[in-house]
Amino acid sequence: MSGITIDTINSAVKDMQYAVRGAIVSKAGEIEAALKKDPSKYPFDKIVMCNIGNPQSLGQKPITFYRQVLALCDFPDMLDSKEAETLFPADVRKRARDILANTKGGTGAYSESKGVAFLREMVAAGIEKRDGHPCDINDLWLTDGASVGCHYLMSTLIRDENDAFLVPIPQYPLYSATLTLYGGTLLPYYLEEEKGWALDVAALKKTCDDARAAGKNVRALVVINPGNPTGAALDLANQKEIVKFCEAENLLLVADEVYQENVYAEGKSFTSFKKVMRDVGATIALASLQSTSKGFYGECGRRGGYMELNGFDKEVMDQLYKLASVGLCPNLSGQIVMGLVMRPPEEGDESHALFKKERDDILASLKRRAKTLVDGLNALEGVACNPPEGAMYAFPRITLPAKHIEEAATNGMAPDALYCMKLLEATGIVVVPGSGFGQAENTWHFRTTFLPAEADIVDVVAKITEFHGKFMDANR
């Protein structure tokens, strides 16, 4: 009999939780398998995965430019074929040739541990154009998604349970999961739902002071902008406050900016924390994270991303490089897409018109879908939802009946988790309970994406509306 049992593995792995792919998603998988065997078993014919920001799984088409360049990089013989000029625009062919000329061995070979230098130069050029400030490729790590950057930071900075990170509540559970895994402490700071999920710097300072008084070594502040799961987009004045707070408290600022292309609110736009830091002349340590999975690109399966570090000691950078080296290199497809995201076709390029149309159509559609979903949610009894200013999610607050709360307690479940499980079993719609993200005491929420296609989002709203009405009637 094996000596490897649940009792002999790392307790931190057992304690780690990741609600986005938790019990409800597991149940959805069981239902999906059951539907294949017996399509009449449930009162719906398919599972709709609204639990995760995975656009292409819900029908979003890939951006043509990215896929064309990838195709040529993966099959370079095509570049020299007579069909290439007919099938691929001139700028696509040139971009692929440039990438291949600077990638030793092509996409099937290991690259430098921080990513191909030429691709990091593409990313750096995009950052400089966005922010108006220089970017050194030596400060860039190309990563397998933004989450790898988070793991690098946590594994390097967390020494024991006394090391703590300030994390927004509600939060993306990557941060609580990695803090648990590496043995650190999560210090929650609560976003203000009544003020559109605003970040109160005065409350942040109190949390920081209280933690230090209790003996914690507060090392970093995590800010997700635009927010996940809240969809809130910070205004510039608030960002300046945050940067000055980090400077005054000597904190690393971890800026999760993977939704930087997803801002929908009128009068709002994305500004990176690097730009804010440089513009105000602050001296702080800053780690900025970006991904190929979100925005209008939705290339989740490519696992592309970057981490840019500013204000770090060289010796620490060397240790982070060592971490990257252990994994040899990030995958080449993800590296290429990250480079293309940050350096897209420019006006005058043959691919530009189609690229612009595809980008603008996706972002306009996301804005319409967000409104359709939130309007529907706000029409439900006991449900209130702030309009998402950005990202890909709505995070409605639900007032649950006492009868249901008692049932949840009897079943050993959080009330919002039981609600989400019942929604799944009645409609096939998969959402994530707010308890998986953290929430103010005695409040209940769920997170849902607005990624289903426009024709489907209307059906999602209709099914949630029907379910919620019956649910409330049954629990009066």
Image (spheres, rainbow, N blue to C red):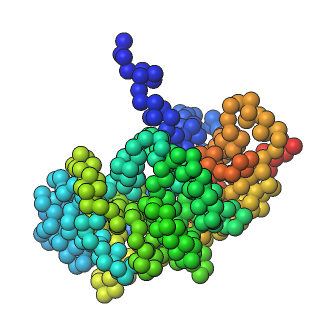
Q: Is residue 231 left or right of residue 339?
A: right
Would you place residue 223 above or below residue 356 in this image?
Answer: above
> How many numbered marks appear?
0
* Image spot of residue 166 (x, y percent): 53, 55
Q: Is residue 194 left or right of residue 282?
A: right
* Image spot of residue 373 (x, y percent): 66, 63
* Image spot of residue 337 (x, y percent): 31, 64
| In the foreground, 20 or 197 | 197
Q: Is residue 121 left or right of residue 195?
A: left
Q: Is residue 45 left or right of residue 290?
A: right
Which quadrant is the C terminus positioned in? top right
Would you place residue 198 above or below residue 316 in this image?
Answer: below
Which quadrant is the N terminus positioned in? top left
Residue 23 in view, yes or no: yes
Residue occupying the far top of the picture:
1
| In the foreground, 38 or 97 | 97
* Image spot of residue 193 (x, y percent): 69, 61
Residue occupying the far right of the picture:
476
Q: Residue at x 12, y 60 (%)?
A: 104
Q: Residue at x 38, y 53 (%)?
A: 153
Q: Residue at x 22, y 79 (%)?
A: 90
Residue occupying the far bottom of the picture:
348
Q: Residue at x 80, y 55 (%)?
A: 382
Residue 67 in view, yes or no: no
